[in-house]
Image: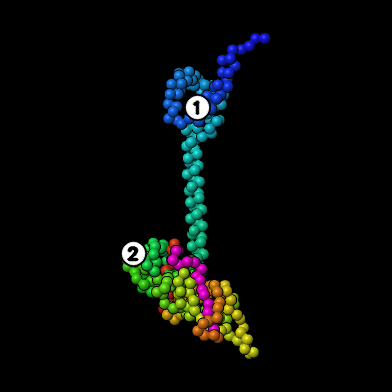
Amino acid sequence: MHHQPALVRWSMPICVISMIILCMLPSGWLEWTGWFRAQARVVVYPIAHPMTLAKNLVIPQSVGNPNATAREQSLKSELDRYRALLYREQQQNAQLTELVDRLSDGAAVTPDVPVTQIPRPVAGLSREYLLVRSGGHERISRSTVAVVNAVQLCGRVVEANDRTALVLPITAKGAPQLLGNVLLDDTGLNVARCMLTPIGKGLLEGDVTKPVADETGTPTATIEKGMEVRLLDDQWPRHAQMLLIGTIESVDPSPDQPLRQRITVRPSVDLRSIPEVFFRVPDLEGGSP
């Protein structure tokens, strides 16, 4: 029986073990292997280009990559550009539709007092005030009413110049008290009066009068969480009356007057982090504000 030399029999295991050991060594110890890489390039590089040509004959570049040709790249770029224009137009149409709906809602609050509603962006906060990009050239002046989403009462302008206006939100700690009506039903006729004071964290709080009672002395309605509270305060312009202050978040017994209840009201949005406000400016021919 013919036996192979020991070197031949052990050559494969020795190669495998050597490769495993080389894979585990740090890369800094393998710089000497660059000599083998250089020798391999001498053999591989001359045949790399013919192999690429052969591959392109079997699988054309235009098939392997549909966007390879200059014309296809140009058409794809045009398609992407028109798609971006379409998306931009759709977004602008949606924003304009939303703006029209807001303006319609704001005008419906006080239809007897014509007002111009001017949307303007909020640039940021200055202490407790909202810094709005607007000014006197748009008839914005001290005490001009600012709202959010055209119906949510935001506050009033306390200072205005040609370029900016400072709005004090109704939830700011330095804001004055508000007189409002709690709407006890959908008709808006059955209401309860309340005096609200800002207490921080975007909330207002105050005592509310008892709802009207029937002949037996039983209240005709109960004050509940989720009811709307709207402005009805002579200290505010006529065109601001019945704007939304917020909704009732909690109802508790009043600690000062046992026969009354105390409500906590939260506006529909956080008035310190809004992107824009609507200024309500009475029309010059619309009578008194």
Q: Position of residue 202 (x, y in %)?
A: 47, 70
Q: What element carries label 2?
A: loop
The region drawn magenta spans: 260-274
Q: Which residue is drawn at 56% across and 77% down?
A: 251
Q: How crowded is mark 2: few (under 14 residues within 10 Å), some or many (20 or more)?
A: few
Is 174 drawn above or below residue 277 in the view shown? below
Q: In which quarter of the image is the C terminus?
A: bottom left
Q: Is residue 267 rendered magenta in the image?
A: yes
Q: Position of residue 260 (x, y in %)?
A: 54, 84
Kindly indicate the quadrant of the structure image that contains residue 136: bottom left
Q: Residues within 10 Å of mark 1 (few under 14, many from 20)?
A: few
Q: Residue at x 48, y 51 (%)?
A: 88
Q: Which residue is drawn at 63% across and 90% down?
A: 215
Q: What element carries label 1?
A: helix
Is 129 drawn above or below residue 212 in the view shown? above
Q: Position of residue 286 (x, y in %)?
A: 43, 75
Q: Name the residue under label 1.
A: 22
Q: In which quarter of the image is the N terminus?
A: top right
